[in-house]
Image: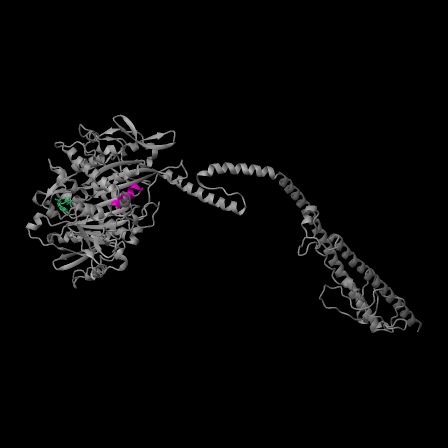
Amino acid sequence: MRNGDSWTEGQNSLTTLTSSMTTGPTSLTAVPQTNKNKNSNKYVAGTKRNGVTKPFGYKLDPLELTNQSSYKTRSMPRSSDSIDSDRRVSFREDIEDHSDTSQASMDSDLKQTTDLPGQTQCRTANGGPEKGPQVSAKEPSNKFLDAARPGAMTWRKAASEPVLSGAGREDVDRFADDVNFDRTERFGSGNYGFDYEPTGRKYTAKPLRATFGSSTSLSTNTENSDDTDDVFNVILRVRPLNAQESSRRDTFSADFPGDGQVSINNSGTIRNFQFNVVFEPDADQQDVFESSGIKKLVEGALNGYSCTAFAFGQTGSGKTHTMTGPPAQFHTVGVTPDPNMYGVMQRSFKYLFQILKKQRTLKLVKASFLEVYNEQVIDLLNNSHRKYLTIRWSKNKGFYVENLFTVECETIDDLMAVLEEGLRNRQTGSHGLNEFSSRSHSVLTVTIDSETQPEPEDENLYITKRGKLSFVDLAGSEKVRDSTANGGPGMVESNSINKSLLVLGNCISHLCDPKKRQGHIPYRDSKLTKLLADSLGGNGLTLMIACITPSSSNVTETLNTLRYASRAKRIKTKPTIKMDPREKLIMTLKKEVKILRQENHYLRQQLDFPAKPRGQLQKENDEKFRKFMKEQHQKETGLYDMLQEYMIENEALRAENSEMHSVKENSRREQQILYKENEKLSGRLEELERLMAENPGTWSFGDHRRTDGYGQHDLSPVGSPVTAGYVTPSHRSTLRPIGATLIVNSSKLPSPVVHGQPMRPPHRLPDHVTRPAPRPVEYIEGNNQSNGPTSPRLSSLVKPGVISPRFTDRKSSQLSQTDVIRGMNEKLKQDLLELDGEIQHQTRIAAKNNNCR
Ligand SMILES: Nc1ncnc2c1ncn2[C@@H]1O[C@H](COP(=O)(O)OP(=O)(O)OP(=O)(O)O)[C@@H](O)[C@H]1O
């Protein structure tokens, strides 16, 4: 025996384990094994039969389905006389028959739902709720109509004759108007279709299958689907009045206005509800299978999603009938189950194996079956000791049942055997409302492991997806009074059923409230909700099948069920594919690599590198690319030398530039100092001259001549005001020639006439000295570089003609400019000294003359 769910144990757990059921002489072999194919370095599922391990694909051999002896050796033991082979053979034949006829349309089966056989007709309401039955003014009850979904519909048996036959276009139009269809629906994919003759003149109206449940409406191929609208569906099945109810003359309390609506008459008060699909009492098992959406769940599980179908409702309302067929046929000795009465479970198994047979890919199908009875989990496939199993929780798996027996199912027979074995072991009891009442919640889980190649071009990458298909048949909610009457089951049984259903209701109301959904969901309050946590609030596809009885005597329970279902209708889940965490990581990395490759490709384009094609040729191209780069390197050796030259040259230029910068800075500073000094000297000269001009009689200048002429001194920076004037006696004391002391008594200063001549105009510096030095011509126009290129290669890059012919060297230009200013400075000092000396000389003469007088 091995644990049922070994998902997080990864591939290592898939070791060959052969275990036998211990419940009878004929054993069911459980071979959950995987052989590692060393050549391909990937895992291949295998099976052990009669000691021989065969590749997993073996079980998809068509012969297998008709191999009677193989079936018999693997049949499940029964406590009663063995009649199973006949039963199963008949169902298998049924599969074969159907597969023959439906095989051709398998493709379309997977894409869209099939047409009705013709004896059923879809009826649609003519105008929605307002045209439905009268709603009591006292108690308006349309609140459950709010979440109606497009495609909601009602199934009702109709006359086998088409509604319109041999009618012309006008008739069809009139008919379409009558049933309130718009034009697009008339000839499109609405609930009615029209066959017409080649002439186009004659039409036959025919009802089409419901679009609900179509596999095309769910994007099951995406890893994380965004389609949250069509993943939690609620359908309603109303059973007919049974013999007991009819004999009591119970009235039929349900009405079906169409469009998936149902109205319940509770003693004159009408309550309306709406679901994805409503099956009226005369819908048969095949109708329910075809139009409930269960096919979509099977397909989802094959694609790696967790899918759950669960039936709920009052006791005796038809849950087990819908899921597996009439319970009597599994519990009555000597009765052969009628394949026509098989429920959605058997039909789903058949559909699953039909797809597997068609796909012929590596798939590993395993099944487990358990029940929750009086809040205890019991393995229905290994219940010889009826041990209670523990529910545990792990980060990767969520809630799971420890030590649950799992059977590998190679064929549909294996799966059928699992179902029958479990049903036989399930707790049933008889009470006033149901002779074969299920006293427990049962969960049959089919897991489908499939290896897929996420990227067709990558032959070595395989990922394993685990899809899960669970069928849950809940114990019926019941009034303890009713169920314990007539020697019914005990209070404990009823209470535990009701309690777990209450917790389920709580979880549903939390899940359908957007605010509460973010918080704590009380899954842990019951074993049932722990097991359903994944289906209710998880990442899967869920189908709730609400079952009700139309009997007026059970209207309160019926309304409870409908409210329950309406609330559940608002639950939204987001389906995601379950993968092994390691494989998930590989996928993530793979995606990253893909993105990086794209980026790389883009950059290559930008840099004019040769593009690396993606996909299967990647390796080959990588090699080519390496070769190309090698060649390029060889070709580019000359370029490399050039690059080195450039680098050396660049370094030299940097050093030169740096030197030039420091020379420039020094000379700029020196010039500034000289400017300032010149300014001072010039100021002193001006003052001295002004002083002499103011006292012309006192001064005579003899031969003192300015070589530079007379005028304004402009030694200040460009733009500063220029002062001009003569040296006045009052300012004599301020005249301080550099290196000499001017001793002048201003009050006794002579007139500024020197040797009988008026004093000369103030000293003026030549223009080229006072103005800032002209900017040296730049080497390249618009380029501030202070140096020219020394490299012949770089020189050749410079356009001829832009180099100034006068330009030789910026450094010398800087220096010459400083020299000019320095020369001027010298000259000013000279002038000042001369003037100062003359003044002193004149002063002495004047003093001498005064003494003589
Ligand atoms: N749609 C139907 N058509 C004909 N018979 C039905 C239908 N639904 C239920 N029945 C019959 O009604 C009886 C009770 O049905 P069933 O056992 O499936 O109810 P249940 O909801 O599973 O009850 P419980 O919760 O007690 O197990 C069965 O004999 C079943 O065959």
Residue 204 appears left or right of 771: left
Identify the residue at the far right of this view: 852
User: What is the chief secondary structure element of the magenta stretch?
Assistant: helix
The residue at 83%/69% (across/down) is 745
- In the image, is residue 2 part of the stretch drawn in magenta? no
Report whether residue 377 is seen: no
Image point (78%, 59%), residue name: 821
Q: Position of residue 545 (x, y in %)?
A: 21, 48
Relative vertical location of residue 166 with respect to residue 396 in this rendering, above or below:
below
Which residue is at the front of the view, 582 or 102? 102
Specify how the rendered protein is coloured.
Answer: one colour
Place of residue 760 in the rendered image (x, y in percent of width and height, measured from the top left): 84, 70
Which span of residues is magenta-colored? 295-304
Q: Position of residue 695 (x, y in %)?
A: 84, 73
Say which of 484 and 93 sits in front. 93
Rendered position, 614 above or below 710: above
Q: Quadrant of residue 50?
A: top left
Q: Position of residue 442 (x, y in %)?
A: 20, 41
Picture quadrant of residue 40: top left
Say above or below: 41 vs 282.
above
Ligand 1 falls in which quarter?
Answer: top left
Residue 612 is left or right of residue 368, and the answer is: right
Nearer to me, 583 or 341: 341
Q: The N terminus appears in which quarter of the rendering?
A: top left
Q: Is residue 652 above or below residue 84?
A: below
Outermost residue, top side: 51
Residue beneath the point at 15% across and 59% down: 270
839 left or right of 553 in image: right
